[in-house]
Amino acid sequence: MTQRLGIFGGTFDPPHVGHVVAALNVKHALGLDLVTLMVAGEPWQKTSEGNVESAVDRLEMTRAAIAGIPGLIAGDDEVRRHGPTFTIETLEKLSRTQPDTELFTIVGADAARSLTTWHRWQDIALFSTLVVVSRDGTTPMAGNNFDGVRVMIANVDASSSEVRGRIRNGQSVDTLVAPSVIKIINERNLYRAVNDTTEYR
Ligand code: ATP
Ligand code: MG
């Protein structure tokens, strides 16, 4: 039987409830067998803007964020590969190594808006069905250049930027991030201002 696999790529710096809710909603809406939260090894569009935590830390936080949730897994393919991370290379590899798997590329609203800046973005449709997670139905399907599927979800007001900002300012993040992820953030002193040793909860 063909497996239906969703690839939900991101920097996951750190992973938060919005990521998990989006992945689970797409899984249910499209009857996917699995959704992989695919951690970008070298997110070239973000590293040019500033600091990104190490791929190892982001991968371990992502594993922690989805631990015990059936149907969600954390993917390390892009962390293992060297050089800038291109989703199309991940899709090409999966279609080669798992020819019986039907692939779905899942993106949120902001990623959908900038999809045309991705490396070989037009080829994504050759290897997968584009899935856009939308909060209000108005999210463009990659500038309307793309056929695809839209999955409506309730708005989860969370972003990794907000989480990083709150930690930097000494505010709690317990409504945004899983306890197991907060534990890693504390143990490894991620995101905080220099000389700050507060235990975040
Ligand atoms: P940042 O704030 O640094 O941009 P982010 O929260 O957008 O981080 P990413 O790792 O950049 O997290 O996003 C990975 C994917 O998750 C993207 O497709 C993005 O659109 C989607 N996403 C992020 N936050 C949410 C959310 N609250 N609800 C649904 N999808 C989301
Ligand atoms: Mg983002």
Image (cartoon, rainbow, N blue to C red):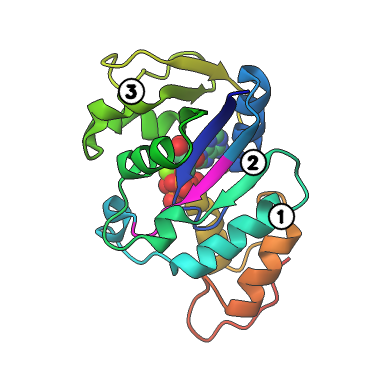
Rendered-image quarter of ligand 2: top left
Q: Does mark 3 have its CB less than 8 Å from ligand 1?
A: no
Location of the N terminus by quadrant is top right
Q: Position of residue 54 (x, y in %)?
A: 44, 69
Q: Is residue 29 above or below residue 63?
A: above
Q: Nearer the viewer, mark 1 or mark 3?
A: 3
Amino acid at circle 2: Val
Please give the residue where the numbered disc 3 appears in the rendered image.
125
Q: Give residue 20's mark.
A: 2
The kind of residue tagged 3 is Ala
State the separation of the CA atoms marked 1 and 3.
33 Å
Provide the secondary structure element on which disc 1 rests.
loop
Instruction: Give the residues drawn in magenta, as a range.
Output: 36-42
> Which residue is at 29% across, 14% downward?
144
What residue is pinned by disc 1?
Answer: 178
Viewer-nearest residue: 14 or 2: 2
The reply to whether dot 1 and dot 3 touch (C-beta < 8 Å) is: no
Q: Secondary structure at mark 3?
A: helix
- Report the residue at 36% width, 27% height from top: 127
* In the displayed structure image, the side of residue 134 where residue 198 appears, left or right: right
Q: In the rendered structure, are the residues bearing label 2 and label 1 in contact, judged by CB atoms less than 8 Å apart?
A: yes
Residue neighbourhood size for the residue with mark 1, other residues' Cα within 10 Å, grouped as few (<14), some (14–19), many (≥20): some
- Rendered-image quadrant of the C terminus: bottom right
- Name the spot of residue 197 as percent of width and height, x first: 62, 83
